[in-house]
Amino acid sequence: MTVALFSPLTLRGLTLKNRIAVSPMCQYSSTNGFSNDWHLVHLGSRAVGGAGLIIIEATAVSPEGRITPDDLGIWHDEHVPGLQRLTAFMEAHGAVPGIQLAHAGRKASHSSPWKGGTVVAESQGGWPAVAPSPVPFGAEEPAPLELDLGGIEKVKADFRAATLRALEAGFRVIELHAAHGYLFHEFLSPLSNQRTDAYGGSFENRIRLLVEVVESTRQLLPADYPLLVRISATDWTEGGWTADDSVALAQVLKTKGVDLVDCSTGGNVPAASIPVGPNYQVPFAERIRREASIATGAVGLITSAADAEQIVATGQADLVLLGRELLRDPYFPLHAAEELGAEVEWPNQYVRAKPRRR
């Protein structure tokens, strides 16, 4: 019996053992950007649980690029040894280690969700947020500082340095975070980008920063290492970034060496009306895959083995990225294989618990 969800996926010179990826999920559990035992246990559990690809949480390329003071970071060489500990464990247990490189833009300097999620004042350890334009995310928030051309060059340099550190740390897949209202998404969307220079106005100008970082990242990566980009395929708001824009962007990204577009939505407008429900973002992955002829990843309330199998088997996406479901069940891949009738290897230490087929 062929189970599409458990078929291998090859991206460049890398082959994933299945089509289940751990979606990047912020843990807000770092001090000064350093990884620790929480990250090892959290990510290690998903590797033991059978995921083919694990993309670790949005990892800040600079201190000012953090969403919160508790974010994971990769802006310093001293961050690398701890990250090497994570990648070594993941690879030892059959998962490909990936990292999402990120800059929070105007959504920086907030407290972690369970600490209120509000802006952290500079007097309390916060820092000024930067953005393409001085337009705050929420009306009650301070306006971010508009990046000048020197600031944009620093962002590009930070992503280059972070990419080199990620390679040194042992990551085999790099994902650039251009979704959820963070810096690259802010440049893409006319709702947050009101610039009149080469980085604002037209579609070509608004995608310029992301494309430049994609080009520099691709140049730094080994030829057989995949490059992914996560986008928000729509702002769900009139006058914002649209699905048509996402198809056009994906077509450009393909020519620049991007191997898969990770298709999320929203996050750039606090009052957006989003029809949240099971698999609600999958149609965007399907459309981009079809119209841009590029591999896509589907995300968004994918919670069952049957749905995940349907998405891959019918060509809606090449990969499913699970978030909350893998928080609830780190062993979802092992359980899904059993449910779907796929034969997969269990960790030697757990084989005694493997259900026996009747």
Image (cartoon, rainbow, N blue to C red):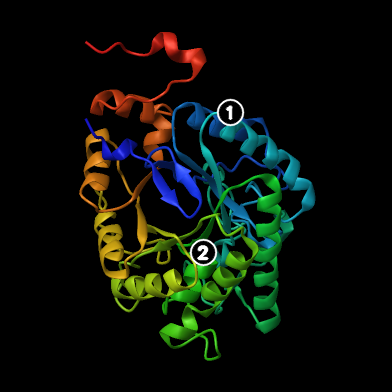
- What is the secondary structure assignment of the residue under circle 2? loop
Q: Which residue is mark 1?
A: 41
**Which residue is painted at 36% across and 48% down in the image?**
319
Residue 223 locus on image (x, y percent): 57, 60
**Which residue occupies the extreme bottom position in the image?**
196
Quarter of the figure that contains the N terminus = top left
Q: Amino acid at mark 1?
A: Val
Horizontal arrangement in the rendering, residue 17 relative to residue 73 (left or right):
left
Residue 160 locus on image (x, y percent): 67, 65
**Badge nearest the viewer, 2 or 1:** 1
**Which residue is painted at 46% across and 44% down in the image?**
15
Horizontal arrangement in the rendering, residue 293 relative to residue 113 (left or right):
left
| C-beta proximity under 8 Å, tags 2 and 1 | no
**Which residue is painted at 63% across and 78% down in the image?**
147
* Mark 2 or mark 1, earlier in chain: 1
Residue count near mark 1 (Cα–Cα under 10 Å), binned few <14, some 14–19, many ≥20? few
Horizontal arrangement in the rendering, residue 139 relative to residue 150 (left or right):
left
Does 23 sit above or below residue 305?
below
- What is the secondary structure assignment of the residue under circle 1? helix
Residue closer to the observer: 350 or 14: 14
Residue closer to the observer: 136 or 84: 84
Count of number-bearing discs: 2
Residue 265 locus on image (x, y percent): 36, 60
Image mark for residue 182:
2
Q: Quadrant of residue 35?
A: top right
